[in-house]
Image: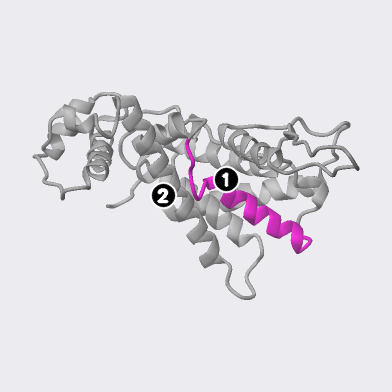
Amino acid sequence: MGKRRYHHGDLRSALLDAAEELVHEHGDTNWSLREASARVGVSPSAAYHHFSSRDALIRALSVRVLSRLGERMAGAATQAAAPGADARQGLVAAGSAYVRWTLEDPAVARLAFGSGARDPDAAISPHPHDVLDAELDQLVEIGDLSAEARPGAEFAVWAAVHGLATLLADGLMTLDGPEAADLHTKRIVQAVLTGLAQETTPLPGWPAARSAHTERQARGQGNATADQPRPTTPNQPPTTTRSTARPTHAKGAGTLNQDTRSSTFTHQEH
């Protein structure tokens, strides 16, 4: 693909667009910042004003595509929440959006889960697992999921959905089109929710799962707590404290171990 022209002031966005094209064409490793610069039509030195290295460009692109995934999942969940619909359909729709997104562009998914999801400083909004959290919290509110089963439930759902997406992307499992993937996603999400409803919580509880995203949230909560003064007694100056508690509902991100660069549905037309 030839050089593109960019509007003054949009170089950062243009470089991200070029990087995404290169990932589509070559995967997440077989290209350089110099190639991205050439595709936009600028010198590498100009690109360095926005990204100090290829890794920095990769991390920024990962944040962009994960945010895009979160938006897609949230939109699917909202659309599924029609009056009178099964309350679980929002969670199922979010999971289906996750699987479809992965299979439509496995190379970009691999990039996102391999880089941006592990960047401890990346602020991803909406984060895909915030979407899962919101849907599961809603099920607790309406009584479809018990409060006892809620801690860590998003990791159980994510593991199932991500596992399905990975099997399909790796070619270890094949399906005849996205509709079939939607049905399998619904089946596994329903199975996880059924299992959560029937489980017995061990003592002292399930091991707490963590991710770069939940640890980033915990740091943010700790910083907010540190700014709040403790109650004071007479002649005692106010002090601050930093919370070390982790959020009860953990969210996370993982890795797609595959190198496929095209949609992996069988018999799917584009």
Find residue 232 and report its horizontal and vertical position in percent. Answer: 86, 43
The color scheme shown is one colour
Find residue 103 and report its horizontal and vertical position in percent. Answer: 40, 43
Find residue 204 and report its horizontal and vertical position in percent. Answer: 87, 31
Looking at the picture, does residue 80 appear above or below residue 42? below
Marks 1 and 2, the one that precedes in the sequence = 2
Looking at the picture, does residue 177 appear above or below residue 31? below
Q: Which mark is residue 129?
A: 1
Q: Does the magenta stretch include residue 133?
A: yes
Q: What residue type is labelled 2?
A: Arg
Alpha carbons under labels 1 and 2: distance apart: 13 Å
Instruction: Look at 75% across and 36% down and name the residue there.
Output: 240
Residue ID for mark 2 = 68
Q: Quadrant of residue 155?
A: top right
Q: What residue type is labelled 1?
A: His
Residue furthest to the bottom: 83
Of helix, strand and loop, which one carries label 1? helix
Q: Assign the N terminus to one quadrant of the image.
A: top left
Find residue 54 and report its horizontal and vertical position in percent. Answer: 29, 26
